[in-house]
Amino acid sequence: MNVVGVDVSKQTLDIGVTVSGRGQLKKCENRKRTFPALLKWAQKASREEHPTFCLENTGRYGERLADWLFGQGCKVHMVNPVRIKAYARSVNLREKTDESDALLIGRFAEQNDLEPYTPTPDNQRELHGLNQFRQNLVIQKTRLSNQLGSLLDEPYNRSVVRQLKNEVKRITELIRQVEKEIVAVIAANEGFCKVIQHLLSIPGIGPVTAPILLEYLLKGFRSGKAMAQHAGLVPVAFRSGTSVRRRDRISKISDADLRTALYMPAVSVICGNSPFATFYNNLISKGKPRMVALVAVMRKLLCVAYGIFKHNMSYDPTKVLAHA
């Protein structure tokens, strides 16, 4: 099978396919009006009526094409760019161009068993967009608040302080509006409402974290462990021979947004009398560093959320320590 690789950017699409050892390339605009011509070229180049395509996961820049190809009956794969980069190193690829990347992506897909892409429903995309927008607003507010705090005692910066206060106030109000829109999206779907209700029964999970967890739970992970790996909450070993014995650490090749969303819930839940606090203290008593124990609590929270989602049930404190 000849897989068509696509290197995606905001403005252009570079398409490449290798047939009988010979690479064929095409470049076109990343616009919906160019997609039919792209597919026609791919059919001819790959010699298949419904070619298989592989794209790097670049967000909405690539999703538009992936959705359209899926609608035309083509099989599509979306791959983490980090995997493509590692594959390029493994085959000792020296050049780095959009054209060579397109061919490389196609060869990578031919040699690996990849999950097929399915379009994300509109309500899930809306929830994702609102969650991302809120997170960006919180980052902006934090940055401006820190800047404001450093200028409050300096009288010659009164004009700047006044404008910073107004901007912080404006962003705070915008965050409230976005949070109302998130609630409205969830309220419009009975299934979303039920999941959110179950998630809010977990200690430490509040109205800000629950919609973020809902967004990721809807992605269809096969297990809680797979979801924890996606978040970078599963320790990665680094050992070789008898001399290399590095401490296990979390993977940075992961979803930092999900990991960040779980940090404060984990911090809050270890301070009470919940089973999560018992789990944390047990790890500390065994000599685990505090941050390692906290990451374990984050992973436990995520696995509990996955179990609640999978079995359509509320939080059961008796099951938290069952597999500790």
Image (tube, rainbow, N blue to C red):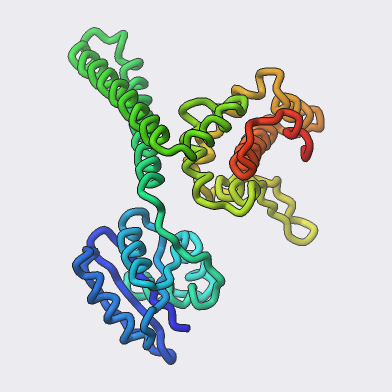
Where residue 263 sits in the image (x, y, percent)? Answer: 56, 31
Q: Quadrant of residue 184?
A: top left
5 to the left or right of 323: left
Q: Is residue 177 above or below residue 2?
A: above
Where residue 213 sits in the image (x, y, percent)? Answer: 51, 38
> Is residue 314 in view from this perspective?
yes
20 to the left or right of 295: left
Q: Quadrant of residue 241?
A: bottom right
Q: Which residue is at the far front?
A: 190
Q: Residue at x 54, y 52 (%)?
A: 220
Q: Residue at x 61, y 46 (%)?
A: 228
> Is residue 143 in view from this perspective?
no
Q: Is residue 135 above or below residue 119?
A: above
14 to the left or right of 5: left
Q: Residue at x 65, y 31 (%)?
A: 315
| Total tally of numbered discs in the picture | 0
Where residue 252 sits in the image (x, y, percent)? Answer: 54, 48
Q: Which residue is at the far bottom?
A: 20
39 to the left or right of 108: left
Where residue 299 sits in the image (x, y, percent)? Answer: 64, 39
The one of 19 and 305 positioned closer to us in this rendering: 305
Please state, as top left, top right, bottom left or bottom right, where the C terminus lies in the image: top right
